[in-house]
Image: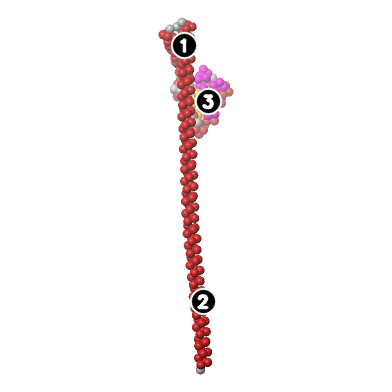
Amino acid sequence: QAEIINKQAMVQALLEDQGAINAQRIFTSEQKNEFATFYDNLNTQIQLQNATEINALKRFNAGEINDAAEFNSQMDAAERQFYANMQFNIDSANAKWRQSVLTTNTAMIFEAMSTDVKNRLDLTQEAQNRLWDSIDNLLDYAFKGAVSDMQFETQLLSAQLGAQANAGSDSSAKWGAFGTITAAALPLIFTSDTRLKKNIVKIDTLKGINFYQWEWNEEGIRIGANKHPTFGVLAQEIQKTHPEAVKTGEHGYLMVNYGMISNEV
């Protein structure tokens, strides 16, 4: 019985020891798992925090770089504007200075020449002033005379067209309208290029010069030819018979000086 009891005690002890060992192993395993989980979570949080800080730092640095670039750009623009204003002011000052110098030099030259004229011709200042007034009146008369001649030429052409209109009945209204237009226009230079016209209809022939009625096409309207009359000659025809009366305008199309062909009609 004692041996059985001892054997049972030994078995019980072994079982208890193994249970304790198993319990210890379970506890140790759980502890390891908990520690591993804890450190994994801790590492994850640390990495997340580091990533957040790095991203924030990068955004901050990018913002600082953008602010610095914008500031530098504004400074460069302000500097260029400043130098441009300075250069403009310098150029303006130089221009005014040169103008003042030229004006002063001109006045001095004029005064010197005036003094030379007075000395050579033995004139007084009053006599010289009368001479300048006479020259000024002469130039004014010449200018007004030239304008009057041009107006006279226009009126003459209008009268000739009017007389021609009275001679015929079919196109009298056209000639009267054309005479009114030419009488109001100075100088008598109109765009008359065939390339700018459409629906061209021949109206009459005077002294070998053909007269037409037309409408302006889109190109003619684009260059402003629709401000001119829609009755007259074709530039390409006049260029062959009266080349001196045809010239090329700034727009690249032919123009006719009706005043130069007025004697013909």
Residue type at mark 2 is Arg
Estimate the spatial distance between the alpha carbons at disc 3 and disc 1, rounded to whole Å: 47 Å
According to the picture, the residue beneath numbered tag 1 turns out to be 114
Q: Name the front one of labels 2 and 3.
A: 2
Local SS, label 1: helix
Inspect this view and state whether residue 123 appears.
Answer: yes
Which span is picked out in magenta? 243-265
Residue type at mark 3 is Met
Query: For this rendering, which residue is in front, 254 or 137?
Result: 137
Does the segment drawn in magenta span residue 201? no
Query: For this rendering, which residue is in front, 160 or 121?
Result: 121
Inspect this view and state whether residue 168 appears.
Answer: no
Instruction: Identify the mark at residue 20; answer none if there is no mark.
Output: none
Q: Name the front one of labels 3 and 1.
A: 1
User: Height in image: 138 above or below 48?
Assistant: above
Q: Residue at x 47, y 43 (%)?
A: 71
According to the picture, the residue beneath numbered tag 2 turns out to be 25
Outermost residue, bottom side: 1
